[in-house]
Amino acid sequence: MLVLIMVLLFTLVLLLAFYVINFVLSIKDMGKNKISAFECGFVSVGKIQNSFSIHFFIMMLMFVIFDLEIVMFLGILVSDLSSYVSFLLMFFFILGGFYMEWWYGKLVWVI
């Protein structure tokens, strides 16, 4: 028990020492670019209306969702034959979602 307390204490002292050394040795540049907000490559001054289209975000979201569903498909396909019903339900669920996106016009690539 004493060894555990000593190891924990040593770890905390070492962590605090590294934190203080990092703070002392770090460069403290307070220029305009350093303290301004980073906006993913967009200039953070000017009109806010010149933003990117929300369609890019929707396409990224659909890609992530369908990519995760493909991973789930692979898990179902390598399992036994009794999961064939689950495979069909998931497949029809994906087709239904794809049909809804097409019906609402979200698959049209317009900027």
Image (spheres, rainbow, N blue to C red):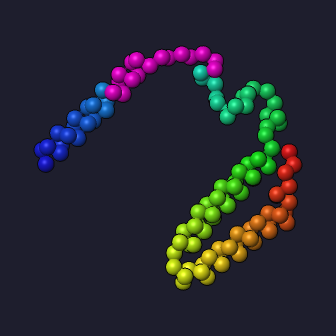
Return the x and y of residue 85 as percentages of the image width and height.
Answer: 61, 82
Instruction: Decide: is 82 above or below 2.
Output: below
User: Residue at image x 68%, y 73%?
Assistant: 91
Residue 32: percent from the left, percent from the top?
Answer: 64, 18
Q: Residue at x 83, y 36 (%)?
A: 49
Above or below residue 10? Residue 107 is below
x, y (%) of residue 39?
68, 33
Q: Nearer the viewer, residue 52 or 65?
A: 65
Q: Which residues are magenta?
A: 18-33
Q: Which quadrant is home to the C terminus?
A: top right
Along the viewing direction, whichever of 3 and 94 lies nearer the viewer: 94
Identify the image quadrant of residue 92.
Answer: bottom right
Is 25 magenta? The answer is: yes
Question: Is residue 59 rendered to the left or right of residue 34?
Answer: right
Q: Is residue 20 left or right of residue 8?
A: right
Residue drawn at (73%, 48%) of the image: 57
Residue found at x 60% / y 23%: 35
The spot of residue 88 in percent (x, y) is: 66, 78
Magenta stretch secondary structure, dominant: helix
The quarter of the displayed image where residue 96 is located: bottom right
Place residue 63 in its image quadrant: bottom right
